Amino acid sequence: MSYNFFAYLSRMRYIGRWSLMRNALPENIQEHSHQVAVIAHALGIIRRDVLQVPCNPEEYAVAALYHDCSEILTGDLPTPIKYHSSRIKGAYDEVENLACEKLLATLPAELRGAFAPYLNGETASRCHDLVKAADKLSAYIKCIEERKAGNSDFLSAERQTRAALEDYHLPEVDYFLLYFIPAFELTLDELGTIED
C-alpha cells in the first residue's frame, strides 16, 4: 500500500501566497514554511538562551514547518477575507482542521500520532505564540523585499505588519526586530562575503 502524505507536502510549492497583491518576487507556501521554521527556531533560541526561559527551539521549528500544510487542500485564503469577521474565521478554522485530519489520514496509522501534535494538536497550541510571531516576521520580511524590488503595493502591508509585530510585546520578537531585521535592508555587497 502507498501513502500520500509526503506527496501532498511536496505540492506546497504550487500554492502561491499573497494572491491579492502584485508580487515582484512570487512566494509559495513551501518557501514560506521553511522561512517561518527558521525564524521560529531562532525565536525559541532567543527565548531559551537570551531570556533564560526553558523551551525546546526544535519543537517550534517543526511546528512552523507544518503550520500551513492544511493549505495544500484549502489554498491560501487572503488575510482580508480570512479575518473579515469572526464567523468567517471560525468557518475557515473548521476547514483547516478538516484538512489536517484528511492529511493525517494519508499516513500509516502507526505514524499519525507522531505528526498529529504538529498539525492540530497540543504541540501546535503550545508553540502558537512564537510560530505566529515567526509567521508575521516572515510576512514583514516579504514586504521589505518587495519594497526593495520597487513594488510599492506592499508599503501599507509593511507598515501594518510592523505595527502588529510591535503590538505583540514579545521580547523575542523585539530582539529579532532589533538585531536581525536591519540586515534585510542591505544589498549583498553591503552584507559582505564570508572572507570579509
Image (tube, rainbow, N blue to C red):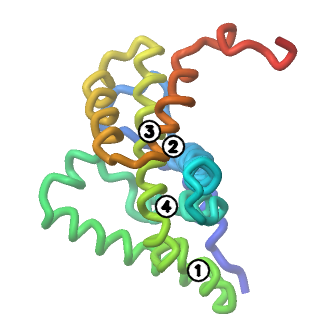
Residue ID for mark 3: 174
Q: Name the front one of labels 1 and 3.
A: 3
Decide if residue 44 is on the left or right side of residue 164.
right
Q: Earlier in the sequence, mark 1 or mark 4?
A: 4
User: Residue at the spot x=41%, y=54% of the render?
Assistant: 132
Q: Amino acid at mark 4?
A: His
Does any portion of residue 30 appear in the rendered image? no
Which of the two residues, 176 or 84, is positioned nearer the viewer here? Answer: 176
Q: Amino acid at mark 3?
A: Asp
Q: Name the front one of labels 3 and 2.
A: 3
User: Residue at the spot x=38%, y=77% of the render?
Assistant: 98
User: Residue at the spot x=49%, y=65% of the render?
Assistant: 127
Which of the two residues, 30 or 66, is positioned nearer the viewer here? Answer: 66
Residue ID for mark 2: 28
Does any portion of residue 88 appear in the rendered image? yes
Farthest residue in the bottom direction?
A: 109
Image coordinates of residue 184 in percent, x first then y, are 54, 23
Q: Earlier in the sequence, mark 3 or mark 2?
A: 2
Q: Amino acid at mark 1?
A: Thr
Residue ID for mark 1: 106
Check contact, mark 1 vs mark 4: CB within 8 A. no
User: Residue at the spot x=44%, y=46% of the render?
Assistant: 171
Compute the Cα span from label 1 to label 3: 39 Å
Which of the two residues, 65 or 128, is positioned nearer the viewer here? Answer: 128
Q: Name the front one of labels 1 and 4.
A: 4
Farthest residue in the top direction?
A: 189
Residue ID for mark 4: 67
Image coordinates of residue 88 in percent, x first then y, are 17, 63
Per the image, label 3 sits on a secondary structure element best described as helix
Compute the Cα span from label 2 to label 4: 14 Å
